[in-house]
Image: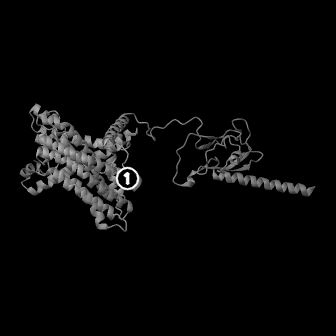
């Protein structure tokens, strides 16, 4: 009998205690933010979408080799002797035309391993994290600055050049 | 009464009756449901330190309107093995049950659908239709979760009707009337005349009654909360166990009807509690209309006080929802049969003894 009334008493008291707690929370300011309008500041070393500054890229392929998931694909063509490709910001001379530089962000695991080997510090993490797409193919980002025609042209140029070189080599071999 | 007024105005009992019947729906239930759903989401949000809907309109006030538009556009899905006839009748019946209760609820001294002598008895009887609708929905859905939810709902509503009725009986015994209009009228315009505080007669009985009236009020509040299937008594819906109980299979406007019925029910039971214990539509401290000698202001004030009290108790229901976890089935039955019913019964006896003193 005593337990019976105790039960009733405990039930009522605990309900009122619980209601007091929830009522207090009704008037505490919310801890959430209105996301698309307000954004939380990102931590200092956040790792999000990669960006490649092609002005500085020398096409050395080190980032692609460092990548553990092979999401970076680079194709390069040697420049002809007369061509001047300019210099990178830290004074390295560029010697290769980068005809393909794609990063597949569907594969990318945001490990930042590609950033460290880069000799010119041209590949780095940005603070962009909203880049969802409806089509997976749209996540393959192309960073190469050359237009498709130019790329074709460079490849063609190099092929002709090396063919000529071959011929010349053959000629000199014959004459000897 | 509003019916007589309209009858005089239009000269046709049919038009007057139709308007009287539709008035609670369009003037009250639909706006109330729109408001209550938003209130629920806002209360839920703020109690969990969130903000709730924020994007449609200022602080999300148009959110429920947008939801209704979405629900209207939705496809009405009927699965192949559903019992089509019962499946279609069930939401209508459920809503009809909770809507019919509004006929006898006195919103103010002039806005009362039907002033029947058996008001409270009628309400308790007609809300039984809701059980039939819910069982029908559960059975016709041909889905184990729906059926389980419906069975639980029926068991719960039937067992919690007993303490409700016992408390109602004690009030009826004390006052000698079942008409909600007379009950509200007798608790004249000051809060110490409410039955929660012993009723309008200022005698020694009034003070003896106060503790038992408080007990009765708590019991009827708890048991009506269980009757409308709201958390902590929401085992018929129990989304973590039963998907969403008897309305798992419903979509679009049929689902909206269940929803509307739930919110209409929430207000209906609050209104019953208010009419029985908290002075119905009477103001707690006199009327502005009396003070300024404006007669037409009084019914409006009464309407305001009635909806205010009703919505306050709806708010308390929401408050409880976000405070208490769900009861287990055996705990639910124990709460009713071992605690509420015996207490309500003894309360009835004691109130009876006090009233013959």
Q: Quadrant of the C terminus of chain B?
A: top left
Q: Which residue is mark 1?
A: B238
Left or right: where B281 falls relative to A126: left
Q: How is the image coloured?
A: one colour
The picture quadrant where one finds residue B196 is top left
Indicate left or right for A99 with B153 as reference: right
Q: Is residue B234 left or right of residue A157?
A: left
Q: Residue at x 54, y 43 (%)?
A: A129
Is residue B249 visible in the rendered image? The answer is no
SS class, disc 1 = loop
- Furthest toward the top, the residue is B291
The percent position of residue B292, horizontal first and vertical second, equals 11, 31
The residue most toward the front is A1
* Residue B148 appears anywhere in the view: yes
Front in this rendered view, residue B26 or B128? B128
How far across and down, in percent of the image, does residue B101 sit? 20, 52
User: For the residue carrying disc 1, how many other residues have a C-alpha within 10 Å: few (<14), some (14-19), or many (20+)?
Assistant: some
Mark 1 chain: B
Residue A98 image offset from top left, x and y in percent: 69, 48
How many marks can you see? Answer: 1
Viewer-closest of B163 and B21: B163
View extreme (right): residue: A176
Q: Is residue B334 above or below residue B300?
A: below
Q: Position of residue B47 (x, y in %)?
A: 37, 39
Occupied quadrant, residue B202: top left
**Vertical placement of residue B8 versus A34, above or below:** below
For residue A82, side relative to residue A40 (left or right): right
Q: Residue at x 37, y 63 (%)?
A: B143
């Amino acid at each position: 009998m005593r337990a019976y009334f105790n039960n009733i008493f405990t039930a009522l008291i605990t309900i009122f205690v619980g209601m007091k707690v929830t009522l207090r929370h009704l008037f505490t300011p919310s801890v959430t933010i209105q996301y698309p309008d307000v954004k939380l500041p990102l931590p200092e070393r956040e790792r999000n979408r990669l960006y490649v500054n092609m002005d500085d890229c020398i096409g050395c392929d080190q980032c692609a080799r460092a990548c553990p998931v092979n999401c970076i694909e680079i194709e390069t063509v040697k420049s002809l002797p007369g061509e001047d490709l300019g210099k990178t910001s830290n004074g390295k001379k560029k010697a290769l035309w980068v005809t393909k530089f794609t990063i597949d962000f569907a594969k990318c695991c945001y490990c930042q391993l590609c950033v460290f080997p880069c000799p010119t510090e041209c590949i780095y993490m940005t603070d962009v994290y909203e880049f969802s797409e409806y089509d997976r193919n749209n996540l393959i980002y192309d960073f190469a600055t050359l237009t498709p025609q130019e790329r074709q042209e460079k490849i063609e140029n190099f092929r002709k050049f090396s063919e000529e070189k071959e011929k010349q080599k053959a000629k000199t071999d014959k004459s000897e | 009464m509003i019916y007589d007024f309209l009858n005089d105005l239009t000269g046709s009992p049919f038009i007057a009756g139709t308007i009287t019947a539709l008035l609670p729906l369009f003037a009250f239930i639909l706006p109330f449901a729109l408001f209550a759903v938003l209130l629920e989401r806002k209360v839920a949000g703020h109690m969990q330190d969130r903000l709730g809907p924020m994007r449609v309109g200022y602080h999300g006030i148009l959110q429920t309107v947008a939801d209704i538009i979405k629900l209207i556009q939705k496809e009405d899905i009927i699965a192949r093995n559903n019992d089509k006839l019962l499946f279609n009748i069930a939401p209508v019946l459920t809503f009809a049950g909770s809507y019919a209760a509004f006929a006898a609820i006195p919103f103010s001294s002039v806005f009362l659908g039907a002033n029947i002598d058996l008001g409270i008895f009628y309400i308790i009887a007609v809300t039984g239709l809701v059980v039939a609708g819910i069982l029908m929905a559960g059975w016709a859905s041909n889905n184990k979760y729906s059926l389980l939810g419906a069975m639980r709902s029926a068991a719960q509503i039937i067992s919690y009707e007993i303490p409700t009725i016992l408390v109602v009986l004690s009030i009826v015994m004390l006052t000698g009337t079942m008409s909600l209009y007379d009950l509200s009228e007798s608790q004249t315009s000051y809060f110490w005349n409410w039955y929660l505080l012993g009723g309008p007669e200022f005698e020694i009985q009034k003070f003896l009654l106060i503790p038992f009236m408080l007990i009765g009020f708590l019991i009827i509040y708890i048991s009506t909360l269980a009757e409308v299937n709201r958390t902590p008594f929401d085992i018929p819906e129990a989304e973590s166990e039963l998907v969403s109980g008897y309305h798992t299979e419903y979509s679009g406007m049929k689902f909206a009807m269940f929803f509307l019925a739930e919110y209409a029910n929430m207000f209906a039971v609050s209104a019953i509690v208010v009419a029985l214990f908290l002075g119905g539509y009477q103001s707690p401290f006199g009327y502005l209309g009396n003070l300024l000698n404006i007669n037409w202001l009084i019914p409006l004030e009464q309407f305001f006080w009635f909806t205010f009290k009703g919505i306050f108790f709806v708010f308390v229901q929401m408050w409880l929802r976000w405070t208490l976890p769900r009861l287990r089935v055996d705990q639910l039955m124990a709460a009713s049969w071992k605690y509420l019913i015996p207490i309500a019964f003894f309360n009835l006896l004691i109130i009876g003894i006090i009233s013959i003193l």
